[in-house]
Structures are given as C-alpha cells and as structure tokens.
Image (cartoon, grey):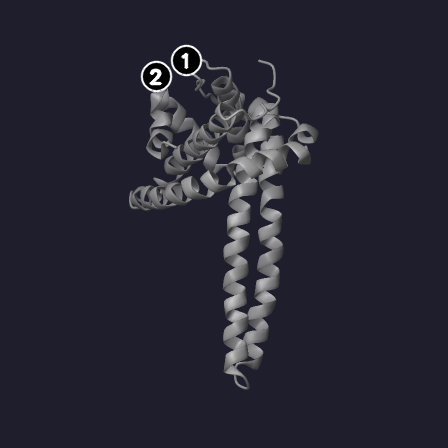
Amino acid sequence: MKVMDSFRFFFTAPEWKNNLMIASVFVFIPVIGQLALYGWQSEIAQRMSRGEAQPIVPLSFDQLMPYMQRGIAPFLSQMAASLPLTVLVVIGNALIIMALAIASSSVVVAILLAAMYLFIIVVGSLLTVVLASILLTRAELCEDISTTFDFAALKRYARAVWKPTLFTHFVFLLLSSVFAFVAFLFCCVGIFPAAAIINLAMMHLRMQLYEGYLAQGGEAFPVKAP
C-alpha cells in the first residue's frame, strides 16, 4: 500500500484549490456537509473503479443536496461500523466504575478490571477500523444500503483484507495525526481543510486495498452505473 500517494491524491486534480475551499466548508456544516462529502467521495471511488484518468470531479456548492443524497449509504455504513465500539465503550465504562468502587478494598481486582477495560477499547477500535473500511468501500461503490450489507460478500472481503487494513490504517493514523496537528496550529481553522484532505486520502487508501483484493482474484463489488 502507498500511504503517501493517498495524501497526495487530493492535489492531483486541476481544480484542487477550489475543491479544497468548498470541501472545507462542507466539513464545517454538521451532518449535511459530511453526507455531501461522502457523496462526492462515492463518485470519485466509482470513477477510480472504472479506471478513469482523472477521477476527482470538480466540487461546487450547488452539488450539496445531490451529493448529500448520494452520501446516505456511506454515512449509515460508518454509523453501523461504530456501533460495536459504542457498545464496548459502555461495557468498559461499567468496568471502570466497578474498579473505582472496589479500589479501596481490592487493588488487584481494580487493576484487573482496568486492564480488561483497556483490552476492550483496543479490540473495539481495531474492529471499528476493519468494519468501517469494508463497509465504506462497498457503500461508496454501490450507493445502495441493501447491497452494502451483503454479509456473505462482506465476510469474504474482510477475510482477505483485514491484515493489510490494520497495518495501513495504523501508518495512516500516525501520519494524519501529525498533519492535523500542524494544520490546527494555523489559527485552528486549518483543521477543516486538513479534514477534507484526510477524508479523501482515507477513501483512496480504501480503494488501494480493494484493488489489491481484485488483483488477488477477489470478487468485484457492484458499482453504481455512471
């Protein structure tokens, strides 16, 4: 996987400055803006799957609503991927409360409960990374909720890509954290364009994983017609 290529991907479009300005505004708009960005990324992912020379289409404000509608399936996929972690966090919080309650009477038990909490959070985070990657890849390509949640197809894909997914996303997280921190130093507002670049870079990374899966003989996902 070429993680740095994912970060450079945003800037390969001739209109990248205009795209960055509008995408930054979309990032700032709660929910609706995020939906629109998912819709834009879906169009780009589909163009990449068809091998188009310039997959990044120009972004404009009058596309907010059309892209918002196209972003529903990826948005719901992201929400579904975060559910296991949410449940595990609730369980972990219960363990921490128990640990604090018995800390004065049994330090050993309190330490064990805290270790269990850490283990649960780590496992939940890793599970979320894999689920989000496989669900978003399928949702962005097909833009259909029922097709996205084809569990047999998702299981086959997850079995093939979970290892490279964890490794590449770990490297990506390190690089994107540094990038976001540097952007935040620019009067805080730099975080919005940084988020737009990181979001598209993550989509590009997902497509790299998908293309690697196809190269190994994997089953192609249904792609929405242009």
Give the image location of residue 166, x and y in percent.
46, 43
Which element carries disc 2, helix, strand or loop? loop
Total count of labels: 2
Nearer the observer, 166 or 20: 166
Q: Residue at x 51, y 15 (%)?
A: 50
Q: Residue at x 52, y 37 (%)?
A: 133
- Quadrant of the image containing the N terminus: top left
Three-letter code, disc 2: Pro
Q: Which mark is residue 14?
A: 2
Nearer the observer, 19 or 187: 19
Considering only vertical position in the picture, is 120 above or below 84?
A: below
Do we see residue 179 in this rendering?
yes
- Quadrant of the image containing the C terminus: top right
- Residue for badge 1: 53
The answer to which of marks 1 and 2 sits earlier in the sequence is: 2
Q: Is residue 90 left or right of residue 216?
A: right
Nearer the observer, 204 or 187: 204
